[in-house]
């Protein structure tokens, strides 16, 4: 039931779950309420250096537990939020929360925040980012925004311009889920990404010695290296996956093997200070 529509047709956005109109409407109403009643939260997953295993940063991931429906995956509700014009307020809330939280971490630890295509195209996006930095006091270089190829499929020129403004502020950019969307590679030469994130599907394939996956990971690492970009292997769960992505030359690793997405307090406690000080 997930994807019988849209397959062969022109699809300008990344593949999304096709929910029935009724389910979508239910989620939309519930999501609006969740935002008002503060039922949303943010968890943080460590990203470690492949070489040393040291935590270089955390990716912020939104969570929603509905009082009756239980936990709802962001893969399901983010597209609903985009369609219902709720992504701007939700995205802004995640951004502000994550920037404040990062102020509790050592100064060399970065925070990454996912930004969807719809959010990026919002007219006040850049000023919201500036405000989040100013209000939290987080230096721009400690913030990383993750976008997917899909931002270039919408409106290539304006996406490039917005990303240019973000870079000019000193914020880092990473390219999420690389290789899973489809678009030309032209934008890679125009936008200065710091990191390309290699999608978990390729990591899994490579560690099982699927020749195509191995070839893709090798090619992505080589491409990133020659463009002066780092690579993060996503969704690394096992020791053999760690070995494989290390052997293939990925520079950073993220996945359950090193740490699951965790509540803010737990992330803080990793730095051994018990998380005493408080901001906002
Ligand atoms: P993503 O940005 O590619 O995030 C990585 C996803 O992989 C997360 O799923 C994370 O929990 C999961 N993951 C991490 N390590 C492993 C692993 O070892 N094995 C497996 N199987 N999975 C792993 P999550 O949190 O369910 O988020 C799904 C997607 O929803 C994200 O993919 C991102 O596209 C979107 N998303 C999450 N939070 C936000 C947000 O605040 N704003 C926006 N716009 N999108 C978000
Ligand atoms: Mg991401
Ligand atoms: Mg990803
Ligand atoms: Mg992914």
Image (spheres, rainbow, N blue to C red):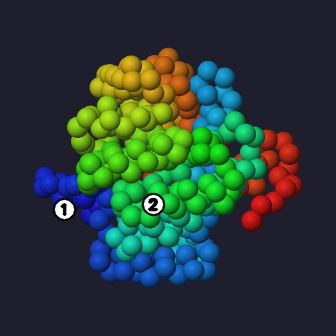
From the image, state whether disc 1 or disc 2 is nearer to you. 2
Mark 2 neighbour density, 10 Å: few (under 14) some (14–19) many (20 or more): some
Residue 11 visible in the snapshot: yes
| Residue tagged 2 | 125
Taking the spot 25% from the left edge, 43% from the top edge, the residue there is 182
In the picture, the quarter occupied by the C terminus is bottom right
Marks 1 and 2: CB-CB under 8 Å?
no
In which quadrant of the rendered view does residue 99 lie?
A: bottom right
With respect to residue 90, does 206 lie above or below? above
Q: Residue at x 61, y 21 (%)?
A: 51
Residue 196, how many percent across, how many down?
43, 34
Q: Quadrant of the N terminus?
A: bottom left
Q: Is residue 116 above or below residue 202?
A: below
Mark before the other along the chain sequence, 1 or 2: 1
Residue at numbered disc 1: 5
Would you place residue 179 above or below residue 20 in this image? above
């Amino acid at each position: 039931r997930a994807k019988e529509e849209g397959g062969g047709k022109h699809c300008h956005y990344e593949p999304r779950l096709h929910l029935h109109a009724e389910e979508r409407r239910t989620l939309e109403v519930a999501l609006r309420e969740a935002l008002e009643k503060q039922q949303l939260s943010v968890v943080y997953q460590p990203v470690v250096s492949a070489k040393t295993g040291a935590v270089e940063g955390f990716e912020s991931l939104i969570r929603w537990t509905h009082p009756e429906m239980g936990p709802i995956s962001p893969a399901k509700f983010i597209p609903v939020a985009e369609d219902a014009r709720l992504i701007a307020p939700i995205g802004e809330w995640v951004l502000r929360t994550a920037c404040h939280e990062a102020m509790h971490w050592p100064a060399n630890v970065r925070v990454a925040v996912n930004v969807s295509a719809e959010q990026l195209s919002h007219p006040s996006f850049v000023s919201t980012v500036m405000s989040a930095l100013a209000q939290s006091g987080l230096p721009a270089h400690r913030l990383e925004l993750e976008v997917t190829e899909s931002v270039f499929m919408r409106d290539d020129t304006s996406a490039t311009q917005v990303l240019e403004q973000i870079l000019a502020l000193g914020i880092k950019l990473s390219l999420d889920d690389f290789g899973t969307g489809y678009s030309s590679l032209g934008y890679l030469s125009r936008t200065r990404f710091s990191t390309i994130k290699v999608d978990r599907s390729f990591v899994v394939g490579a560690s099982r010695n699927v020749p195509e996956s191995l070839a893709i990971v090798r090619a992505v690492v080589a491409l990133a290296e020659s463009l002066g970009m780092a690579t993060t292997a996503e969704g690394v769960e096992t020791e053999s996956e760690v070995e494989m992505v290390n052997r293939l030359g990925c520079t950073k690793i993220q996945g359950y093997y090193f740490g699951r997405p965790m509540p803010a307090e737990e992330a803080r406690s990793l730095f051994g200070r018990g998380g005493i000080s408080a901001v906002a």
